[in-house]
Amino acid sequence: MTLTLRALLGASVAAGLSTAALAETITIATVNNGDMIRMQGLTSEFTAANPDITVEWVTLEENVLRQKVTTDIATKGGQFDIMTIGTYEVPIWGKQGWLVSLNDLPAEFDIDDLLPAIRGGLTVDGNLYAAPFYGESSMVMYRTDLMEKAGLTMPEAPTWADIKAAAAAMTDKENEIYGICLRGKAGWGENMAFLTAMSNSYGARWFDMDWKPQFDGAAWKATLTDYLDMMNNFGPPGASNNGFNENLALFQQGKCGMWIDATVAASFVTGADSTVADKVGFALAPDNGLGRRSNWLWAWSLAIPAGTQKEASAKKFVEWATSKAYLELVASKEGWANVPPGTRTSLYENPEYAKIPFAKMTLDSINSADPTNPTVDPVPYVGVQFVAIPEFQGLATAVGQQFSAALAGTTSLDDALKNSQDLAIREMTKAGYIK
C-alpha cells in the first residue's frame, strides 16, 4: 500500500470516527404499544439519513410512562429530549410553557394535512405543541364467526343492549371464549378512559357545571352496574389486571368474542399475530339512545420538552416519525393496513388505504367524538375520556383503583362509587374548584 493511499484511508477512518464522536444523542420516552415498537425498528432509516444524530429509546408500560414523563417535565429533570404524550397532557403542558412549539416544522411536513379533530387537541393559542404519531377513537371489534354461530348480526351502530346480548350469546367458558373483554386495570388512561367514555353514553358526568362531582348519581351507578355485570358474567378471569395490551393478546388468541377499545388495535387484531385475523368485524362504539356514543378521542403524539438542549435534533426526529413519508415507509415494508392511523387527511384520501376494512370506521369514530360537548348534559370541562384539568390525572387514577377493586370483588359497587365521590369532593375542594 502506498504512503499516499494509507494516508487517505487513515483520513477517511478519522473522519468517520470524528462524525460518530460528534453525533448528538437524543433520548425518546415512549409507550410499549405496537406502533411505537415498529417505529423503533425503523430508527435505522432515520439515523442513516441523519448520521449526526443517534437515538436512545426508553420504552415503558402506559401507566409508568405517564408517571415518568410527568415527573420529568414538572421537575425540569431533562431526562428526555422527546416524550410520547397524549391529548390530555398537551393543552395543559402547552399552557404552562413546558413544550416547544412545532409551528416552524418545514413546509413539507404539511401541518394543514393533519386531521382537524386531532390537530385541534394538540394546539394551544395557535401553537402546535405535539405532532400526532397516531390518532384514535374507540370502536367494537368482534368475532364474525361467533356472531354467526350465535345467530346474531352486529349492527353498524349498536346499543349497549345489543352488546350485552351478543356477549351472553358468544360466551363459551368451557372453551375459554369470553363474550366481552374490556379494560379493568386501574389507571386514568386505562380503565377510566374506557369507563368515562362509556359513562358519557349513559348520561353521566364527572362534574356538573359547578364542578360538583357526580359519582353519587344514577347515571354512574347504571354505568358501573352494566360494566360489572358484563365483565363478571361474560368476561375473562383476572380482568381487573387487564389493560389495552392484555386484552389485545386475549383477542389475538381467540379468547374474546368482543373487545371495545382503541381503533388503533384494528391492524393488530387483523394482522399476522392474530389467530382470528380473517374473522373480525367492526362497529361503532355503543350508545344508550341518549345522543352520545361511548367513543373517545385520543392521539399518542411526540412532543419536545422546553428544557432540552437538543431541540434541533429532536425536531428532525419528530418531523420524520410523523410525516407522510413515514406512513409510506411503513406501507412499503408492512403494507398499508399497518401504517399509524388517524392523523392525516391524505391517508384517508389514499385509494389503497381506503380498501382497508377498518379505515372508514376509524375516521367516522374520530370525527364523531366531540371533546367540547362530550356528555348528554352540559359540563364545564373539555375532554371525552378525560377531564382536561391538571388534577384529573391523580384523581382519576384513585377512582380507577376503586372501580378496579369492584371488578376484582374486593369492594362493592356502592362503596366504590361512594369512595370515588368522597375522593373527588376532597380533591376538588382542595384545588379550589368547589367551596
Image: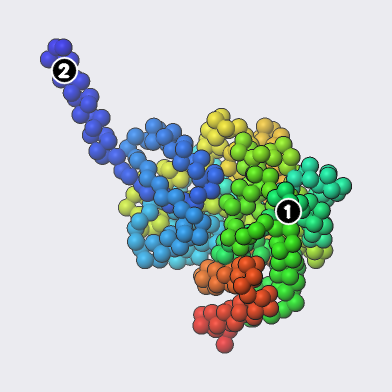
Can residue 96 be seen here?
A: yes
* Residue sitting farthest toward the bottom: 435
Which quadrant of the view contains residue 337?
top right
> Which residue in the structure is indicated by mark 1?
173
Which quadrant of the view contains residue 401?
bottom right
* Residue 221 image offset from top left, x and y in percent: 72, 74
Distance from disc 1 to disc 2, alpha carbons, whole Å, reads 73 Å
* Residue sitting farthest toward the top: 2
* Residue 284 image offset from top left, x and y in percent: 75, 52
- Could you tell me which residue is drawn at 82 percent across and 53 percent down? 169
Which label belongs to residue 200?
A: none
- Could you tell me which residue is drawn at 70 percent across and 50 percent down? 176
- Is tag 1's residue or tag 2's residue first in the polypeptide sequence? 2
Q: In the rendered image, which quarter contains the C terminus?
A: bottom right
- Could you tell me which residue is drawn at 78 percent across and 43 percent down? 144
Which label belongs to residue 6?
A: 2
Q: Is 208 located above or below residue 233 in the figure? A: below
Query: Within 10 Å of the Cα at label 1, are there few (<14), some (14-19), or many (20+) other Cα atoms?
Result: some
Q: Is 106 located above or below residue 303 in the figure? A: above
Numbered circles on residues, count: 2
Which quadrant of the view contains residue 336?
top right
Q: Nearer the viewer, residue 246 or 331?
A: 246
Give left or right: position of 192 versus 165.
left
Q: Name the amino acid, label 2.
A: Arg
